[in-house]
Image (cartoon, coloured by chain):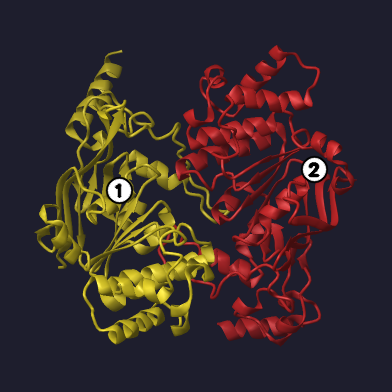
Amino acid sequence: MSKPLLKVEGLKKYFPIRKGLIGKTVGHVKAIDDISFYVNEGETLGIVGESGCGKSTTGRTIMRLLEPTEGVVEFEGRDLNSMSANEVRKVRRDIQMVFQDPYASLNPRHTIGKILEEPLIVHGVSNAKERREKVVEFLKIVGLSEYHAKRYPHQFSGGQRQRIGIARALMTNPKLIIADEPVSALDVSIQAQVLNLMQDLQKEFNLTYIFIAHDLGVVRHISNRVAVMYLGKIVEITESEELYANPLHPYTQALLSAVPVPDPNYKKEQIIIEGDMPSPANPPSGCAFHTRCPFKMDVCTKITPVLAEESTGHSVACHLYTQEGNDDIDRKKQLEGSV
Amino acid sequence: MRERQKLLEVKDLQTTFFTDSGEIPAVDHVDFYVREGEVLGIVGESGCGKSVTSLSIMQLVPNPPGKITGGEILFENQDLLKKTEKEMREIRGNDVAMIFQEPMTSLNPLFTIGNQIAEAISLHKKNWSKKQIKDRAIEMLRLVGLPRAEELMKEYPHQLSGGMRQRVMIAMALVCDPKVLIADEPTTALDVTIQAQILKLMRELNERMNTAILLITHDLGVVAETCERVVVMYAGQVIEEAPTQEIFENPCHPYTRGLIQSVPDMRDKKERLYSIPGNVPKPGSIKKGCRFAARCESAFSRCWEETPELYRNSDVHQTRCFLYDEQEGVTNRDEQATAKS
C-alpha cells in the first residue's frame, strides 16, 4: 500500500477585490474554497474542470507560487504553508512544475543549455562539468539531442518546447511534478508523443504527477485518480475508471456527456447544461452548481453539500447523496402523493 | 431523394504567402465542394492550411503577404475570384458568412451588441427602417438562444461570457440568411459544456434553415458529431476526403489513421497512445515526394520521389497515397499490411 506523498487539507485561496482610491477590499474571489485531497506516491492525480474552476490556482498554491489564505499542504509529512521562504525553496527541488504555454515559459534570450542548467545552479550543483553532463543526459531522456543545448527556444516547435519544459522540471530529480495543462497547446499527434513521454518518465523515475487539464480524454488516459472541480470546490473525486463508468455528480455527468467522441457510430445520451459558470466573486448560495443543475432541489439553494464518501474511494459533494437531500426528495414525494 | 446541388466549389485553389524568406504555398492545389444544406468538416493540425483556405473563400487573406495565385472558387457556379471588391462585399454576409475562433477579438469592444448586429443588417438591407432592423436583430438573438435579447442589445461585448459572445457572432453571421456559413474553429476557445451548447445550436440551425456549414476544426470528436463529410488536410493539401462514417470506420491515409489513433478515448483506456513520430513540416519545406513520407510507417521508395495525387477508393472516398494508386496494385498494399501485422 503506497502512502500519501502530498496531503492537502482545507486549502483556500481568496483573491481580494479592491475598489476605490485607497484600494479598500470590497469582496473576495474565492478561487479555491476549502479543498482537501491526497496524492499517493507514484500515482497520477488528474484535476479537471472548466476555465475559472480554480484548477490552476490549486497547482500554484501547492507550489506556494501563490500564498494560500488558509489550509495545510503536507509534503512528506511536513507542512509547506508554515515553512519560511528559504525552507520552501529547498523543498521545491522535490516539487517541480510544467506549465501550459511552452512559448511563454522558456526565456527567449537563454539557450536551452542555460535554461536547463539553471535549476541545478539554484539547488547548489557547483561543478560546471557535472551540470553540463546532466543537461545532455536529460535532453536525451526527453528525446532531444546534445546539439539542441546551444539553441534558443524560438528554434523549436511547440512539442519540442514542452519536452524542454519537462526536462527542466526533471533536472532536480523531483518526486512530485505538477503539470498544468501540459498538452493543451499542442496538436493531437504531438500531444500523444508528450503524454507517452510523461508516462515513460513516471515509470523510469518513480514520479508522482498532479495533472491539471480540461480535456477529459487526456485526463482519463494518464490518471489513476481524478478530481473534478467546479467553482473553487472539488465536487467529485475517485479512481479514474470508476469516475468515467459511474459518475455521480450531475456536473461530472454533464461534463462527460459534453465531450465530443471521435466515433460517428457512438450514440450517447447528451446532457446539455444551460448557461455559464457563475462568477467566483459572487458564487450562488448553497451548492454552487444549483443554477445549472437538472436535478436541483430546494435544499441545494440553502445548504452547501460537503464532499463525502459515497462508496469506497468515491467521494461526491451533492445533495442527491446526502441526508438533507433525501429528506427533500421524500418531502416532495409526500407532497405529490397528497395531491 | 433529390441530388443536392454543389453550392460552393473550390477548384485547384492555391494561396501563397510571399515573405522575405521566400514563397510559402500555404494552400496548394486544394479541391473540395459543399452541397446545399450540408455540413462539411475540414480537419487538420496547425499549419495545414485549413484556415487560409477559409479566408481565401471569403477573400480575406491579408495581402500582402498573402495572395490567391490560382484556381477557382465557384459559388452557385459563379467564380468569386473574378468578382470586384464591391461585388464581394455584397456576397460576404449575404450569401456566405463567416464566424471566427476568437469571440473575444471579433467583436468591437466600443460598440453595443445591438449596434454591431444592426450594422451587419443595414449593410445588406439598405431600405429597411430602423425599427425593422432592430426587430430583426432581436429576433436573431432569440434564435441563437440568448436570454433577455432586448437588454442584450444595449450591452457591450465585455459584459458577455465567451459562449454568449460566440452566439452573438453566429447571430450576426446569420442575419441575412446566408446559404453557406464558414465556421473557423468556432468552439476551440470555449469550455466543453459551452462547446456542446454551440455545436447543438449549429446543428439545429443547419436543420431548420438549411444553411450549409463549412466547419473548420482540429478536433476529430467535433467532426464525428457534426459533419456529414470530411476533408482531411496536411501541409497545404487535401490528403483524404470521405463521408464521416467512412473516415472513422475505414481511414485510408496513414496520416488520418494515425490522427484518429492518437486521440485519447474517453470511453476506453489504452495502455499507450499511438503517436505519429516527428513534427508537422513547415509549409513549403518539402519540395519532392509525399509530404507525409518522413513520418509515415508505410513509406516506400516511390513516396520520396513522386508526389501522389488523390486516388479514388470508391465513389465517395479519395486518398492522396500511393497505396491506393491502381498502378501500385493491390500487392504493395498487401505487403504493407502483412509487414505491419
Q: Identify the residue shown where x is 42% and y is 64%.
A: A107
Please state if B252 lies on the left or on the right of A63 as rendered: right
Quarter assignment of residue A206: bottom left
- Spot occupied by residue A79 in the image (x, y as percentages of width and height): 11, 56
Secondary structure under the numbered disc 1 in the rendered image:
helix
Residue A323 or residue B282, whichever sits in front: B282
- Name above or below for residue A157 compared with residue B118: below
Quarter holding the C terminus of chain B? Answer: bottom right
> How many circles with numbers are drawn on the protein?
2
Chain name for mark 2: B
Instruction: Farthest residue to the front: give it.
Output: A21
Which chain, by letter, is yellow? A
Residue type indicated by callout 2: Met
- Name above or below for residue A159 compared with residue A227: below
Can the viewer see residue A56 in this picture? yes
Secondary structure under the numbered disc 2 in the rendered image:
loop
- Spot occupied by residue B328 in the image (x, y as percentages of width and height): 77, 82
Residue type indicated by callout 1: Thr
- Spot occupied by residue B281 in the image (x, y as percentages of width and height): 62, 71
Quarter holding the N terminus of chain B? Answer: top right
Residue A194 or residue A260, whichever sits in front: A194
Please state if A153 lies on the left or on the right of A84 as rendered: right
Residue A328 or residue A69, whichever sits in front: A69
Residue carrying label 1: A57
Q: Nearer the viewer, mark 2 or mark 1?
A: 1
What is the crowding at mark 2: few (fewer than 14 residues within 10 Å), some, or many (at least 20)?
Answer: few
Chain B: its colour in the image is red
Residue carrying label 2: B1
**In whole angstroms, how far apart are the C-alphas of marks 2 and 1?**
55 Å
Chain name for mark 1: A
